[in-house]
Amino acid sequence: MLQPFTSESVTEGHPDKLADQISDAILDECLRQDAQSRVAVETLLTRGLAVIAGEITTHAYVEIPEVVRRTINEVGYTKTEYGFEGDTCGVMVAIQEQSPNIGQGVDTGGAGDQG
């Protein structure tokens, strides 16, 4: 019997690609400062707004809006007429420390997608 299989595939210019780059840049900056960082961050993009949410446990200090804006500009979204611009977009940050229960699970069972 055939089993249906589905997957998501996005092409160049899709917001998911930029969102992933932003999340990766935040992770990279945390790890650059603290190799033991635990980072589970998601990015949502809509016209003129980047929302960064998740959990981070680290000794690093990361200026998240700065990382977000730099990444957006590096990709080339530098003009308002593009519908998104790094220097003027809103950046909303909702980051908290990783819950102790997840932290304990990561210590004993591995990170999975939780940093």
Image (cartoon, helix red, strand yellow):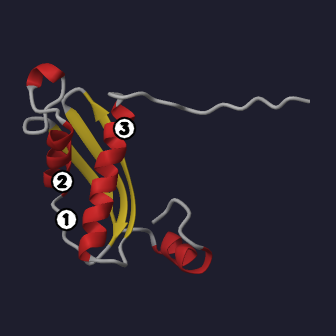
Q: CA distance from mark 2 to mark 3?
A: 16 Å
> What amino acid is found at the position of numbered circle 1 in the picture?
Val
| Residue 16 percent coordinates (x, y) | 38, 36
Task: Tell me where residue 41 sits by quadrant.
Answer: bottom left
**Is there a contact, CB below 8 Å, between mark 2 and mark 3?**
no
State which quarter of the image contains the C terminus: bottom left
Residue 43 in view (yes/no): no
Taking the spot 18% from the left edge, 28% from the top edge, the residue there is 84
Q: Nearer the viewer, residue 68 or 17?
A: 17
Q: Nearer the viewer, residue 48 or 101?
A: 48
State the residue position of label 3.
Answer: 17
**Is there a contact, CB below 8 Å, between mark 2 and mark 1?**
yes
Marker disc for residue 67: 2
State the residue position of label 1.
Answer: 62
Q: Secondary structure at mark 1?
A: loop
State which quarter of the image contains the N terminus: top right
- Up-down relation of residue 111 to residue 104 (above or below): above
Q: Secondary structure at mark 2?
A: helix
* Number of marks in picture: 3
- Up-down relation of residue 9 to residue 26 (above or below): above
